[in-house]
Amino acid sequence: MPDPFKKLASTLESRFSRIATQAVSGLPAELGVITNAGLKLDSFKHEIPDYLVSEQLQTGLRVGDRVLAIPVNAGNYAVVVCRVVSRGG
């Protein structure tokens, strides 16, 4: 009969390892797109209606613009730091 405590210990170890990795690595910047409803990050299926933008971008973003955003506050908010374009413009 398998030892239930070994399975519990293994599960806890895996979860703590994942949490420690996130704490050490931080949240990476992500690509996204500006939509009519807000900001849609490439790795997140929902649009973020309330997001922050750097001061330089306050009047310069349009629907369809590709942007670089940094998730903050445990991913509850995002800050758009710049618009990104292909190398050719």
Image: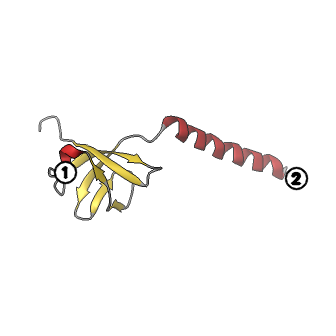
Residue type pointed to by label 1: Gln
Q: Earlier in the sequence, mark 2 or mark 1?
A: 2
Q: Is residue 64 left or right of residue 7?
A: left
Look at mark 2 in the image and give the residue it sits on.
1
> Between 10 and 49, which is closer to the camera in this rendering?
49
Evaluate if marks 2 and 1 touch, with contact meaning CB atoms under 8 Å apart: no
Residue drawn 65% across the image and 43% down it:
16
The single residue placed furthest to the left in the displayed view is: 89
SS at badge 2: loop
> Between 43 and 23, which is closer to the camera in this rendering?
23
Residue drawn 29% across the image and 56% down it:
39
Residue type pointed to by label 2: Met
Q: Is residue 3 left or right of residue 86?
A: right
> What separation in Å lies between label 2 and label 1 (alpha carbons)?
63 Å
- Horizontal and vertical percent position of residue 86: 18, 39
- Horizontal and vertical percent position of residue 79: 32, 48
Q: Is residue 40 left or right of residue 87?
A: right
SS at badge 1: loop
In which quadrant of the rendered view does residue 55 lie? top left
For mark 1, does the 10 Å Cα neighbourhood hold few (<14), some (14 to 19), or many (20 or more) residues?
Answer: few
Is the image coloured rainbow, by chain, by secondary structure, or in one colour?
secondary structure
> Between 86 and 55, which is closer to the camera in this rendering?
55
Residue drawn 70% across the image and 47% down it:
12
In which quadrant of the rendered view does residue 20 lie? top right
Residue 58's mark?
1
